Amino acid sequence: MSFISLEQLPFVGMSYEFVGEKEGAPFSAYIVGAKPGQGPPLHKHPYVEVAFTIEGQATITVRDEQREVKAGGIVVIPPDTPHRFVNSGDTTLRQIDIHASPKFIQTNL
């Protein structure tokens, strides 16, 4: 059992990184706090990712499809599927991205 706070997690770029294998969990997560215009490059993972938008809005690209997602939106991204998001609003985008892996495996495209 672990009790940790966000501040104890590594902060890289725009996200706190919860690495499951370090905490005895079978999944990992990015806890995102992206500024307007901020987002990762097009990339893919060999496992499912589920993105929960908590606050703000994002333009999410999955394969060749783009959608605007607002607070309350959930996107399920299949394995090996090119995707990305960008904060398309004017406030901080808060998102929790669950990765079905105890460690992050990402290939930037």
Image (cartoon, rainbow, N blue to C red):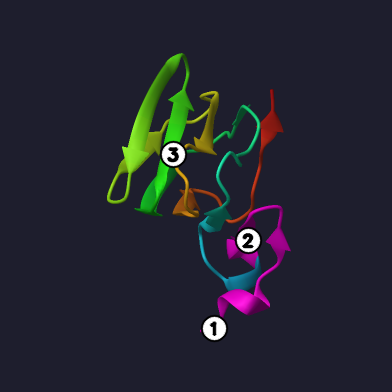
Which corner quadrant of the image does residue 106 belong to?
top right
Which amino acid, by three-letter code, is at mark 3?
Answer: Ala
Between circles 2 and 3, the one closer to the viewer is: 3
Which amino acid, by three-letter code, is at mark 1?
Answer: Ser
Q: CA distance from mark 1 to mark 2?
A: 15 Å
Position of residue 81 relative to residue 105, above or below, is above
80 displayed left or right of 78: right
Residue 25 point in image, percent of width and height: 52, 66
| Residue at image mark 1 | 2
Which amino acid, by three-letter code, is at mark 2?
Answer: Glu
25 displayed left or right of 109: left
Mark 2 residue crowding within 10 angstroms, few (<14) / some (14–19) / many (20+): many
Residue depicted at 44% across the width and 39% down the height: 58
Label 2 sits on a secondary structure element that is strand
Label 1 sits on a secondary structure element that is loop
| Residue at image mark 3 | 58
Residue 81 point in image, percent of width and height: 51, 24
Q: CA distance from mark 1 to mark 3?
A: 31 Å
| Residue at image mark 2 | 17
| Mark identifier at residue 11 | none
Residue depicted at 58% across the width and 35% down the height: 45
Label 3 sits on a secondary structure element that is strand
- Going from N to C along the chain, the mark reached first, 2 or 3, is 2
Residues rendered magenta in the picture: 1-21
Residue 64 point in image, percent of width and height: 46, 13
Total numbered circles: 3
Mark 3 residue crowding within 10 angstroms, few (<14) / some (14–19) / many (20+): many
Between 3 and 36, which is closer to the camera in this rendering?
A: 36
Residue depicted at 64% across the width and 48% down the height: 104
